[in-house]
Image: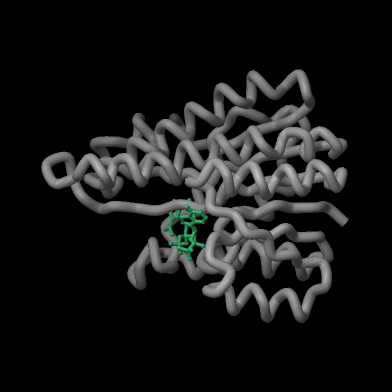
Amino acid sequence: MNTIFITGANRGIGLELTKQLAKEGNKILAGCRNLKGADELRILQKDFEHVHVMELAVDDEDSVDQCFKKLSENNQKIDLLFNNAGIIDWSDLNAVTFDSLEKVYRTNLIGALLVMRASVPCLRKSEQPLVVNLSSRLGSISLRGNTQLGGAIAYQCSKAALNMLTKQSAIDLSALGIRVLSMSPGWVRTEMGGSEAKYEVDESVRSMLQALRKLQPSDSGIFLGEDGKEISW
Ligand SMILES: NC(=O)c1ccc[n+]([C@@H]2O[C@H](COP(=O)([O-])OP(=O)(O)OC[C@H]3O[C@@H](n4cnc5c(N)ncnc54)[C@H](OP(=O)(O)O)[C@@H]3O)[C@@H](O)[C@H]2O)c1
């Protein structure tokens, strides 16, 4: 049984990761910022005794510290961390506001950094620790200008910055045996992705988990699609 921490586990891709990984028999630490709005997680918790709901707002440093302090004090091991929590603002360069830029960066970049850093003591207890940052093809600089949708400037910049976090932390944490990668789930039918998206959420998650199972021990500091193929930065 692996122990897996998932941020933003109460809906969308995070909830589906929780479902599929709990069904496989893993222990899930399911991060959620609003416990009152976590009905589906509560139901899962009833079905799977190894699902534990943890209060965690990734854009709040105190919340991150409290959550991981408790886990470290309890000597908790984490084998796999999904930095999944994320938000989008579709505004383009002309329309985006200072507040929105700040909010998107706080969640998608700073939140991911804080969670990854705070989880290191728990990750170090694992034999093969891995961090997966949920990124997006919209964060790929080299894909700009082709047919890929664009214009969500705050989101795109935040995911490009998240990719740099992946690359640099893969280097910084390699001495501790912690691997870090970015993964795009594809375009998925969630609240964020909308109803026109390519994948049902269960398809995307199944495909990502399959790709993660095929990773080589040396795979770190890379950017993968849901199909396991590398995406250029
Ligand atoms: N859907 C797509 O097509 C797509 C494509 C590429 C990448 N992604 C990435 O995949 C990840 C998941 O996306 P999704 O489609 O599942 O989005 P979603 O349906 O909008 O769900 C987002 C999740 O993140 C949580 N969250 C947001 N801000 C948070 C914060 N400050 N602290 C804790 N949790 C927070 C939300 O919690 P609340 O319920 O409390 O708001 C929710 O659980 C995101 O990082 C997204 O950028 C998605």
Front-most of residues 221 and 105: 105
Q: In this figure, what is the number of numbered marks?
A: 0
Q: Is residue 224 above or below residue 19?
A: above
Percent position of residue 154, x then y: 29, 42
Q: Quadrant of the N terminus?
A: bottom right
Determine whether, in the image, residue 2 is placed left or right of residue 211. right
Front-most of residues 63 and 175: 63
Percent position of residue 77, x then y: 83, 45
Residue 183 visible, this orientation = no
Determine whether, in the image, residue 113 is placed left or right of residue 171. left
Percent position of residue 132, x then y: 62, 43
Colour setting: one colour
User: Which residue is pictured at 48% across the width and 32% down the height?
Assistant: 163
Q: Quadrant of residue 141?
A: top left
Determine whether, in the image, residue 92 is placed left or right of residue 205. left
Residue 104 visible, this orientation = yes
Q: Is residue 222 above or below residue 150?
A: above
Front-most of residues 27 and 149: 27
User: Which residue is pictured at 78% across the width and 47% down the height?
Assistant: 71
Percent position of residue 10, x then y: 57, 67
Q: Quadrant of residue 175?
A: top right
Q: Is residue 48 above or below residue 78?
A: below
User: Which residue is pictured at 29% across the width and 41% down the height?
Assistant: 101
Q: Residue lying at the far left in this picture: please name it.
A: 94
Q: Quadrant of the C terminus?
A: top left
